[in-house]
Image (tube, helix red, strand yellow):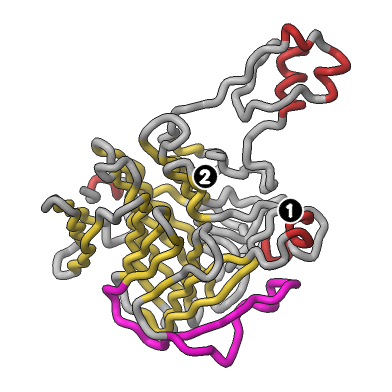
């Protein structure tokens, strides 16, 4: 689907058909969503020959939902539109996962960054709710539970470019700041620039994974088996195949997928250690037994320092990559990223360096 799991459930297609049928029959309200067969309510209580058609939304959302601290950005229309969600924190603990400032992205009819949802009262839910299972940063290998509200620093758009900047300050001194730029390529698919600043603790892990066939993650640096695992205390089921490349400089590439559908990541900042492993990808209890080998190839950028900055440029690919090179320039007051596309097209993006309100005025 193209909808964020605001209820932390694995029902990604939006409101269930039964709710649609009740709302239509009792309240004369038509809720958009996935088209499906009549529910038991409709069969027992309505004239099926007069059952209204359920429409599907084909528009992208560019909006910040202040109550839930959810930022939505996208472009295009129809089933292959691009929709991104950056989930902030509303300060509540009830029915919340430890996934601060996590990302979800849908593009070209594909779900790119997975969110596992909720596996009810099952041992697999321990991993699903943990920080390292999300598309975010882990501090000192521990879960970062909600408790404080995030702040929207910037939200803007220029043409087909979108910008979101969000900050989360914990009472224990940990600070997370994430600034996202979403760009539309000539083929309609996106390039995503992710700037993630972290402060506090002793080490920071930037976890990223993509929905792709298993064992398709390819990275530039050479890796070897890692003696120690990570995060196993957060998962009832084993985390597998830990590899390390040790310390790496910036300016190298990783890629997931095979065939025409791939996702590349240009890592522009250095890290103390590059780690890869495989993590559970189940979204329902049934999947755990039906697909025991459903694991995602995960990339970890680890920094052993009190302050970290991660900058990663993702390209969503169908067919041939259109991004030849991504270069980071930190000589000015604000970091600048130059994207070189095929056909000699160049795009330059300036990102806000500091945590500041109305940061969209610096972004260009």
Residue 17 as seen in the image, left or right of residue 160: right
**Magenta residue check for 325:** no
Residue lying at the far right of the rendered structure: 44
Task: Return the residue nearer the eye: 200 or 38.
Answer: 38
Q: Within 10 Å of the Cα at label 2, are there few (<14), some (14-19), or many (20+) other Cα atoms?
A: many
Q: Is residue 174 visible?
A: no
Q: Which residue is mark 2?
A: 69
Residue at left offset 61%, top offset 74%: 142
The stretch in magenta equals 223-252
Task: Return the residue nearer the eye: 264 or 121.
Answer: 264
- State which quadrant residue 279 falls in: bottom right
Query: Is residue 311 depicted above or below 182 in this figure?
Result: below
Query: Is residue 193 depicted above or below 64 in this figure?
Result: below
Residue 52 as seen in the image, left or right of residue 46: left
Q: Which residue is mark 1?
A: 284
Q: Quadrant of the N terminus?
A: top right
Residue at left offset 41%, top offset 60%: 177
Q: Whole-percent x and y of residue 51? A: 72, 12
Residue at left offset 55%, top offset 70%: 172
């Amino acid at each position: 689907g193209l909808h964020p799991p605001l209820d932390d459930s694995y029902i990604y297609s939006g409101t269930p058909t039964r709710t649609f049928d009740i709302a239509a029959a009792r309240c004369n309200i038509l809720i958009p969503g996935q088209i499906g067969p009549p529910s038991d309510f409709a069969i027992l209580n309505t004239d099926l020959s007069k059952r209204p058609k359920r429409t599907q939304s084909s528009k992208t959302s560019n909006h910040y939902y202040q109550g839930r601290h959810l930022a939505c950005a996208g472009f295009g229309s129809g089933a292959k539109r691009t929709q991104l969600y950056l989930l902030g924190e509303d300060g509540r603990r009830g029915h919340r996962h430890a996934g601060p400032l996590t990302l979800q992205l849908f593009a070209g009819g594909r779900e790119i960054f997975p969110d596992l949802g909720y596996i009810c009262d099952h041992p697999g839910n321990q991993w699903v709710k943990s920080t390292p299972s999300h598309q975010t940063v882990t501090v000192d290998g521990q879960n970062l539970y909600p408790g404080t509200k995030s702040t929207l620093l910037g939200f803007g758009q220029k043409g087909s470019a979108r910008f979101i900047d969000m900050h989360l300050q914990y009472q224990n001194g940990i600070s997370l700041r994430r600034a996202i730029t979403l760009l539309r390529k000539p083929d309609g698919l996106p390039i995503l620039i992710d700037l993630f600043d972290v402060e506090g603790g002793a080490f920071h892990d930037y976890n990223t994974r993509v929905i792709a066939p298993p064992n398709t993650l390819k990275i530039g640096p050479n890796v070897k088996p890692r003696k120690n695992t990570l995060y196993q205390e957060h998962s009832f089921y084993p985390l597998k195949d830990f590899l390390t490349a040790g310390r790496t400089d910036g300016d190298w590439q990783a890629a997931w997928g095979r065939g025409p559908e791939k996702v590349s990541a240009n890592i522009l900042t250095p890290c103390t250690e590059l780690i890869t492993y495989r993590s559970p990808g189940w979204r329902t209890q049934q999947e755990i037994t039906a697909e025991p080998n459903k694991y995602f190839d995960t990339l970890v950028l680890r920094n052993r320092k009190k302050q970290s900055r991660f900058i990663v440029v993702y390209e969503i690919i169908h067919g041939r990559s259109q991004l030849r090179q991504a270069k980071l320039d930190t000589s000015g007051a604000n970091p600048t990223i130059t994207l070189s596309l095929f056909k000699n097209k160049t795009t330059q993006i300036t990102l806000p360096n500091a945590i500041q309100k109305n940061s969209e005025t610096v972004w260009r």
